[in-house]
Image (cartoon, rainbow, N blue to C red):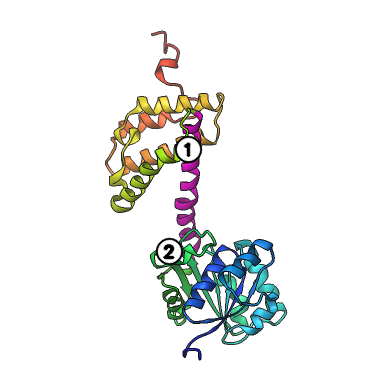
Amino acid sequence: MAKPGRLGVGIIGAGKVGAILGAALRAAEHAVVGVSAVSEASRERAENLLPGVPVLEVQEIVERAELVLLAVPDDALAPLVEGLAKLGAWQPGQLVAHTSGRFGVSVLAPIRAAGAVPLAIHPAMTFTGLSLDLARLPDCTFGVTADPAMLPIAQALVVEMGAEPVAIAEADRTLYHAALAHGSNHLVTLAAQSAQLLRDVGVENPERMLGPLLRASLENALASGEGALTGPVARGDVGTVQAHVSALRDHDGGHSGDILAAYTAMADATARRGADRGILRQDQLAQLEKALEPGHLPESEEGPLDGH
């Protein structure tokens, strides 16, 4: 017999996020009544993580579910919600939660108009779509947004999945999501670029070399913020920064490739933040900014100035 307060849950989108959250809700003894899965990969994921749950058409899932979880790409969310509203699929009192980081509940306006309850619950975690993700949920936070009276419902769903809810205001959702994407996605790009350079100079296992350094840097940054900053920019070591820029330009065949562009952008941001926080003097900042300008050459490569 189901416990009081248990819901019939429908999962729209058996991607990496939807399948894992569906499994987490099922582990909390909610009944998953249906899942939509279009691709072969999503069908296999649904079978592995939600065994016995029927794969149904989207409209049938909405008809059966007391809680509908919309785990679809950001750009697909609004058209899906509006299309189902035109079909009269949404039901009064039904809970409808989406997992998009970018949107709050305003994107679910057609749901509200039908008398259903809109919720936004976004996990601040990257998913593999494998069962090991379930073990990571207790260390995960969710950005939750809902009408004030309904916020406790969104928070309770997150707690039931074993994670921690953090309320995000509707107006702040895009900036919240930008913060997560900047930290997570760009960290992957930086690691990949660093590994590429090491491979290019003959390091056979760059991941082994980078792993301890990057893990320590991340842990120190999370613990101490910019107080953990080290390296040539933090020291105001202009000559080293110039040498880096020159070497990266040579590596890219004399033009600015993606690694040089990323290096100069991040070094400039680091220098500016360092100066704002008193780590660098203003004259050091000016020298670093000059060294990072497009086309700037180290002094050893520059011609004589003013005839001297």
Vertical comparison of 111 with 267: above or below: below
Which secondary structure dominates the residues rendered in magenta?
helix
Which tag, 1 or 2, sits closer to the chain's start?
Answer: 2
Looking at numbered disc 1 in the image, what kind of residue is underneath it? Ala
Q: Which residue is mark 2?
A: 136
Under circle 1, the secondary element is helix
Image position of 88 (left or right of 18)? right
Q: Residue at x 67, y 70 (%)?
A: 80
Q: Which residue is mark 1?
A: 195
Quadrant position of residue 228: top left
Residues shaded magenta:
171-200
Counting from the top left corner in percent of width and height, residue 100 is at 54, 65
Counting from the top left corner in percent of width and height, residue 197 is at 48, 32
Is residue 105 in view from this perspective? Answer: no
Vertical comparison of 48 with 61: above or below: above
Counting from the top left corner in percent of width and height, residue 76 is at 65, 64
